[in-house]
């Protein structure tokens, strides 16, 4: 098994195009976004007998709580190969440990794109990984197959969701607008900030969102959607369209118009846009864990999860974020993240 850096966009994207388990967090564009953010990255290819069998986009994260290497929703592995996931991960880990020591990173964090099952969990355990105290990206997502016709998709939705979409379509005061202009971030931010204050979550900075839009707009893979009610923007979202998949990435809405189904129509228009672009999967991104009773109702994502699930689809659970400890400094980071998780009610 050999690990080599990949510097050709075409090689990277073509490999991912042949893989089933992937998200835009491993795209070439996400790597370019990390560079715009000032982060050091490595695009590693894992080769077996000269054949590319996996890729791992790795970035160096420098935070107040510590420095670490991070692989978001990866490594991405080609299906039906001779090499096992254990062999791929083992070879990659040997490479990453050397880099971590050189870069003075206290740990390696991997947020796997692999299905959450006993075999994949044990693969990480057997290589001495431990569960991360907090997730970095979505570990439970809600995905919808959008290959069927619009009529079939509507029929597969929750009755209430379908009704609200139709009511919104009849309402002349509701308007959905699409934009590819990065300057429209100014229109998105007020709604985004208002939502963050209401739901008590930390927003991404304006520069973070601007760099993200810049990185993906090169290939026309990102778009704003704005929902207006009587001329006022009351719902807004940023979508990423990549490799026949659509991702509901960032969003916000104003609570004073919560009874007006603007967000339902916005979501439906985004699904139709994804179909026009040839997308087969519509990823609603993160939802609450599959918990029961009072614990399920108290989860901060409970309401948003119910909204997403109303459009039809299925739950997908990924292996939880994994940490490989390099130095004692890891435990300082561990304590801080554990406290953050408790405060967020996750």
Image: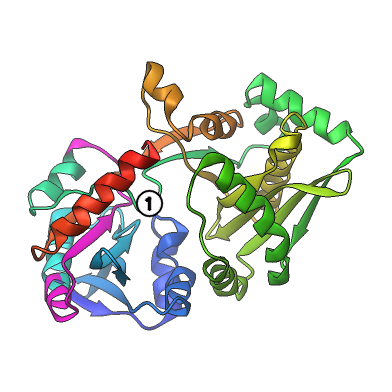
Q: Residue at x 41, y 82 (%)?
A: 8
Name above or below for residue 297 compared with residue 28.
above
Q: Quadrant of residue 310?
A: top right
The answer to whether residue 317 is visible is yes
Q: Residue at x 15, y 60 (%)?
A: 330
Residue lying farthest right? Answer: 172
State left or right for residue 299 relative to residue 110. Answer: right
Residue 182 horizontal/vertical position (percent):
68, 70
- Quarter of the picture containing the N terminus is bottom left
Stretch of the chain drawn in magenta: 97-118
In the foreground, 193 or 227: 193
Magenta run includes residue 194:
no
State left or right for residue 265 relative to residue 124. Answer: right
The answer to whether residue 59 is visible is no
Residue hosting label 1: 21
Badge 1: residue crowd in 10 Å (few <14, some 14–19, many ≥20): some
Q: Quadrant of residue 324?
A: bottom left
Magenta run includes residue 110:
yes
In the foreground, 342 or 86: 342
């Amino acid at each position: 098994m050999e690990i080599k850096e990949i510097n050709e966009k075409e090689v990277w994207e073509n490999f991912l195009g042949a893989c089933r388990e992937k998200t835009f967090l491993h795209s070439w564009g996400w790597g370019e976004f990390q560079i715009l953010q000032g982060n050091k990255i490595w695009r590693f290819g894992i080769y077996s007998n000269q054949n590319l069998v996996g890729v791992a986009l790795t970035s160096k994260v420098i935070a107040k709580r510590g420095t670490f290497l991070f692989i978001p929703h990866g490594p991405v592995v080609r299906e039906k190969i001779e090499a096992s996931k254990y062999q791929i991960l083992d070879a990659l880990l040997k490479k990453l440990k050397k880099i971590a020591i050189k870069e003075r990173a206290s740990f390696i964090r991997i947020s796997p794109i692999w299905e959450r099952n006993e075999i994949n969990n044990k693969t990480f355990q057997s290589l001495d990984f431990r569960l991360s105290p907090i997730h970095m990206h979505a570990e439970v997502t809600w995905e919808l197959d959008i290959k069927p016709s619009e009529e079939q998709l509507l029929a597969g939705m929750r009755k209430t969701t379908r009704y609200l979409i139709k009511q919104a379509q009849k309402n002349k005061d509701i308007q959905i607008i699409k934009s590819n202009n990065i300057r429209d971030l100014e229109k998105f931010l007020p709604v985004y900030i208002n939502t963050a204050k209401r739901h008590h979550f930390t927003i991404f900075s304006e520069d973070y969102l601007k760099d993200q839009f810049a990185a993906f707009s090169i290939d026309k893979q990102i778009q704003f959607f704005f929902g207006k009610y009587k001329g006022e923007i009351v719902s807004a979202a940023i979508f990423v369209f990549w490799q026949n998949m659509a991702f509901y990435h960032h969003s916000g809405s104003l609570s004073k118009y919560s009874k007006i189904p603007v967000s339902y129509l916005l979501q439906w228009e985004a699904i139709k846009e994804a179909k026009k672009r040839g997308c087969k999967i519509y990823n609603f991104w993160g939802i609450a864990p599959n918990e029961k009773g009072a614990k399920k109702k108290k989860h901060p994502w409970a309401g948003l999860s119910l909204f997403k699930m109303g459009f039809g689809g299925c739950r997908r659970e990924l292996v939880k974020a994994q940490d490989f400890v390099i130095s004692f400094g890891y435990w300082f980071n561990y304590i801080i993240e554990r406290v953050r998780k408790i405060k967020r009610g996750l």
